[in-house]
Image (cartoon, grey):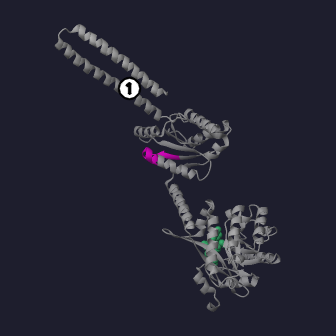
Amino acid sequence: MNRATISALKVSIIYAVFASLWILFSDIAVETFFDSPYLRAVAQTYKGLAFVILTALLLLILVLRDNRALEKANDIDNLTGLLSLNMFIRALNSTIKQLNPGERILLGYLDIDDFKSINDAIGFEQADLFLQDLANDIKEAVLTGAFVSRLHADQFASFNVLDENIHLDNHVRDFQQLFVRRAKKNSIKATCCIGVALYPADGVNAKELMVSATEALGVAKQQKNAIQYHDKELTERAMLRRQMVIDLQEAISKEQLTVVYQPKYNLKTLTPSGVEVLVRWIHPEQGFIPPDVFIPLAEEHGLTSGISKLVVNKASTELGNSTLLGNQVKHVAVNISATEFNNTQEMHELTEFIQSQVNLAPYIRIEITETATLTDMKKSVEIISSLQASGISFSIDDFGTGYTSLAMLKDLTVDEIKIDRSFVSGVEDDHRSRTIVNAIIAMSKSFDINIVAEGIETAQQLKILQEMGCQEAQGYYLGRPMPLDDLIKHISPTSH
Ligand code: C2E
Ligand code: CA
Ligand code: CA
């Protein structure tokens, strides 16, 4: 039997005893004091009425007492003894109403990074204990006058009126330090993020302030161990980015991304030698979004392997149905991201996927930027060798922009390098660019590596690179990236 039942039973027994005694003694009293039957009848009626009024009053008192106990229980978070969310909101609203002109309130949300893995590592009991200890620290510590609540499992909220002399940043950092010290005491490896909203700048009531604090925390949570003040512009940007990621995911899954082809030319014969496949995203509302904008976003959110497969698949369908493959187009270059290149599993899947496209597979060349191969040279050598063993050739993109460009060729057996556009654009009048391009060409030749000059925009650049002995070239002067139909017209022999 629980406490509520026992207490209800107690009340019933007390009520039964007192009511019986009342009936017994009040009847004796009526009999004793009144002789006339009329007066006795009147006394009985009033006695009944008094009984009803008294019991009603008693019931009212009991119900009120119960309600208050219930409200009190709801005001408190069971685990930590902190204020419940409702109580916190009420306290915040009433504090706002009582503020003196010019006073400000700081609302901070503290969220533990990766709490799930902490739970997994130390078990629920220890994790609960940590939350309780942390709650006690927050209650007791620096934040005197603060109201504190636990919003979710591992998320705390605190607000206090800001003292005029207080240093805002230090104050927020104290909040974070409290967490750091507690984690250390409990021997837990954990960090936390804090989102901050200020009254009145970020909201004029509890609801608005809490939305702002949530947004600030959302931005902070994009990193770990971060503090973020609410900033409308920043939040809007973060929301736009978030929306763009969602849209990009949808575009990938619905295969709404398309591809264009930029021709490459043999510089000796000035005939087409291959194409580079470049991805395109026409957003339903925002229109064309350049790959330089959405590829980094895809890298951040693990979407690049989806893009690569889509690009290979589109190229395979489109080029496979044309007569270009093996004729004007002897290789098809596909760009992949550093994140994908450095992920063994994803590279393995991509290789298998390419091999499954039997028409296209023999022509595929993977392009990867120089900087992507630098993170782990030994691993890069392995990945490149395994690609080559699968019949996929390999090209280093944007060559010359990394720090160890020439030295890396000592270890990497690549099939091709593409001289970055920044050097090509300088060959006409910048002596240093010309020297660098000459050196790259000379060395690549001695290593038997194919060289492509990227971003040729003028006849003069083309001529200089031809004279320098560069083998292939690509650029707006020779052909912009274009859809397959245009490419066919552009490079078919009759068009020249
Ligand atoms: P990138 O691989 O260096 O590709 C060459 C970029 O230079 C392309 O821009 C192309 O349109 C542009 N370009 C070509 N010739 C000229 C020229 O003569 N002058 C100038 N100014 N630009 C020229 P795009 O298509 O906007 O692509 C930008 C970058 O986005 C690419 O640079 C590549 O890093 C990335 N990217 C494109 N498609 C894919 C893809 O399917 N997957 C991945 N992971 N990255 C891609
Ligand atoms: Ca490229
Ligand atoms: Ca490039």
At x 56%, y 63%, the residue is 249
Residue in front for this viewpoint, 36 or 427: 36
Observer able to see residue 38: yes
Q: Is residue 37 left or right of residue 82?
A: left
At x 58%, y 83%, the residue is 486
Q: Position of residue 189 (x, y in %)?
A: 67, 43
The crowding category of the residue bearing disc 1, from other C-alpha atoms within 10 Å (few below 14, some 14 to 19, many at least 20), is few
Q: Is residue 5 left or right of residue 31?
A: right
| Residue 99 lies within the magenta run | no
| Residue 199 lies within the magenta run | yes
Residue in front for this viewpoint, 416 or 69: 69
Q: Quadrant of residue 68?
A: top left
Q: Mark 1: which secondary structure?
A: helix
Q: Position of residue 298 (x, y in %)?
A: 61, 63
At x 20%, y 16%, the residue is 41
Q: How many marks?
A: 1
Observer able to see residue 229: no
- Where does the magenta region start and end? 196-209
Determine whether the beta carbon of the residue marked 1 sits less than 8 angstroms from the nearest atom of ligand 1: no
Which amino acid does the dot numbered 1 rest on? Leu
Q: Is residue 155 left or right of residue 47?
A: right
Residue 140 sits above or below residue 253 on the image: above
Residue 118 sits above or below residue 276 on the image: above
Q: Residue under circle 1? A: 62
Residue 455 sits above or below residue 92 on the image: below
Please state, as top left, top right, bottom left or bottom right, where the C terminus lies in the image.
Answer: bottom right
Q: Quadrant of residue 59?
A: top left
Q: Position of residue 83 (x, y in %)?
A: 49, 36
Q: Position of residue 50 (x, y in %)?
A: 27, 19
